Image: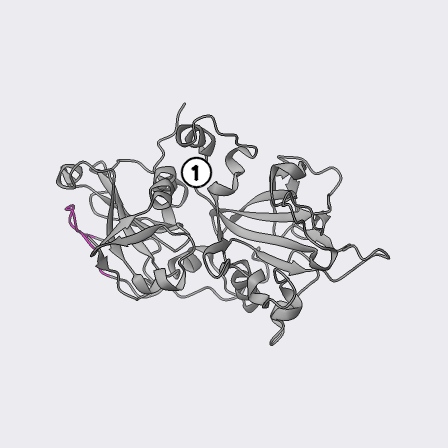
Amino acid sequence: MGRRLGLMRLPWLMVLVVATGCGEHSEPAPTPPKKLPAANPQKSKFRFPTDNRALLRAAGEDDFFTPTGPGRSWRSGSFGCVRNTGTRIHEGIDIRALRRDENGEATDSVRASRDGKVAHINSNIAASNYGKYIVLKHEADGLPVYTLYAHLNAVADGLEVGRSVKAGESVGILGRTSNTGDGISKERAHLHFEIGLQIHTQFESWFHHWYKGGKNHHGAWNGMNLLGLDAAEILRAEEAGGFDLASHLSEQPVLCRVRIHQAKIEWADRFPELVIQTACAETLPAQAWEVDLNFNAIPIRLKPLYAEGLKAKAGGVRFELLEVNDEVRRKHPCRSLIFKKGARWVLTTKGQRALDLLAWPGRE
């Protein structure tokens, strides 16, 4: 427990079928990194959600990202541990407005980043610091993924949950709506844009299990259930050609490895490309799972374990923290999933909560 995870990026996290044993530590041998496919002009890809494409220019970040205030770096509008001196995560990217009306209000059109369906619309500004926003769900390289468009001045007419949208179709107007006390100034009007993954399809039952009597205004599309990836990195990669979501996930630095003592995890069914298959997969039921998490608690590799008695050996706990990469933790501290207690790494309450949601068995 508390062993330091190696710094390699584990390029073998995609589908692996290996003849390993069925014991507790049946670690497969790494395979060579999968070659990315050549750029295919017919392949669906993530598009920029507004006309602002300054991100693609050399040193164009100042013209692309909206910082959190005057004198702040553009980095405060980018993805990651960029808020509150690195202690708060920003799960999207804040894209600058390009167009204004005579009153100085932003008028940029916001468009769907790729083909998909409307999953959630929030028109109640008081219900979220995202103000008016929409969530679209997509399939990218066979994997379920979402995009989120926040602080909208207006949602496009006729948009409703369940409706299909095409990449490039207007979904709203860029704005500055929010329920925060200080609001968003005209100068800072921007699109908060996310690309990420939904952790559990039965989030609502988990929420009422974890937060007795709590209010959830956004169903399964609650922000606690949506974990972001770096949208700017993905947009750049798409423009370069050959982007593949499973490969992108496999290249995420691993913050920690955990063991979840239960037979079934919904995530493994929805993201089979991230599961390491073994020779026992078709003959024995899984007893537990080893899961690699990135700093934002996204599972990027899962391995089923088949040996019996693992939970008893662990003292009956549901979750074990097996390994930690302290270099990744120091670089990305904002999720606060783990901390060091004496000489030992342990899960924080936030870490326990993230795993409890991931492992939620659901309710009928």
Instruction: Please check the rendered image and state whether residue 7 is part of the magenta-colored stretch, yes or no.
Output: no
Classify 10 Å Cα crowding around label 1: few (below 14), some (14-19), many (20 and above). Answer: many
Find the magenta span and give its range.
19-29
Locate residue 192 relative to residue 265 in the image: left or right.
right
Looking at the picture, tell me which residue is in the foreground, 109 or 168: 109
Residue wearing tag 1: 200
Magenta: main secondary structure equals: loop
Locate residue 3 relative to residue 84 in the image: left or right.
left
Q: Position of residue 108 (x, y in %)?
A: 75, 56
Looking at the picture, tell me which residue is in the foreground, 177 or 135: 177
Dividing the image into 4 quarters, which one contains the C terminus?
top left
Looking at the picture, tell me which residue is in the foreground, 164 or 338: 338
Q: Position of residue 65 (x, y in %)?
A: 62, 64
Residue 363 showing in the rendered view: yes
Q: Position of residue 199 (x, y in %)?
A: 43, 42
The number of callouts visible is 1
Question: To which quarter of the image does residue 190 belong?
Answer: bottom right
Amino acid type shown at disc 1: His
Question: To which quarter of the image does residue 28 belong?
Answer: bottom left
